[in-house]
Image (spheres, grey):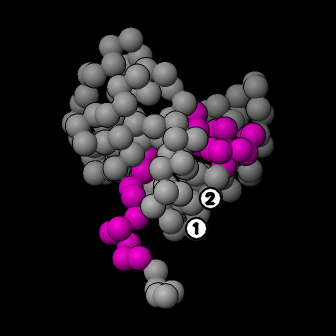
Amino acid sequence: RSTGRKKKAEYPKVVIDSNVFISAVVFGGKPREVLNLGIEGEIRLAVSIEFLDEIRAVLRGKKFQYPTRVLYSIEKEIVAISEIVDPHEEIQAIPEDPGDNRVLECAVESGSDYIITGDHHLLELSHFQDIRIVSPDDFLREYRKK
């Protein structure tokens, strides 16, 4: 039995939607399990600066009110384990919620295999180009089968 680790290229590249990042940080559960795979290097994460801004704004806002020093630590951790991408292609696949198109742009720009989200507009697509769009639960189920 080989104990060698897989080559980095064999790990799936994933865009974790900001709603899943926020759920991972605040509530744990399946979103946290997905984030832990990124922290452990089992999946490769890609985020955009726009995602980081959105995560920071939500966690700082009235609902959660995270202090600045905690937000800095969270952002520093995300940046340390992620590829930061600057999408150049504008996508208009979801007219009902233009913000969801930013998720698609990040995934396309980074060459991701998956988008992991809780957003129903994105989940209804199920695929975009050759990117699978799944919930945290579905991703974990698929990932564990491999």
Instruction: Compare residues 138 and 84 and report the one nearer the observer.
Output: 138
Whether residue 17 is visible to the viewer of this picture, yes or no, is: no
Pointer 1 with pointer 2, Cβ within 8 A: yes
User: Is 82 located above or below residue 48 in the figure?
Assistant: below
Residue sticking out furthest to the top: 96
Picture coordinates of residue 74 (x, y %)? 65, 52
At label 1, the amino acid type is: Glu
Instruction: Compare residues 104 and 141 and report the one nearer the observer.
Output: 141
Q: How many marks?
A: 2
Residue at 40 percent of width and 64 percent of height: 11
Picture coordinates of residue 57 (x, y %)? 61, 33
Picture coordinates of residue 126 (x, y %)? 37, 31
At label 2, the amino acid type is: Asn
Residue at 31 percent of width and 42 percent of height: 131
In which quadrant of the rendered view does residue 29 lie?
Answer: top right
- Dot label at residue 40: 1
Residue at 46 percent of width and 37 percent of height: 134
In which quadrant of the rendered view does residue 137 lie?
Answer: top right
Mark 2: secondary structure: helix
Q: CA distance from mark 1 to mark 2?
A: 6 Å
Residue at 38 percent of width and 72 percent of height: 8
Which quarter of the rendered picture does the C terminus lie within?
bottom left
Is 112 on the left or on the right of 146, as rendered? left
Residues rendered magenta in the picture: 6-32
Is 116 on the left or on the right of 35, as rendered? left
Instruction: Compare residues 89 and 53 and report the one nearer the observer.
Output: 89
Instruction: Compare residues 95 and 9 and report the one nearer the observer.
Output: 9
Q: Is residue 27 magenta?
A: yes
- Dot label at residue 36: 2
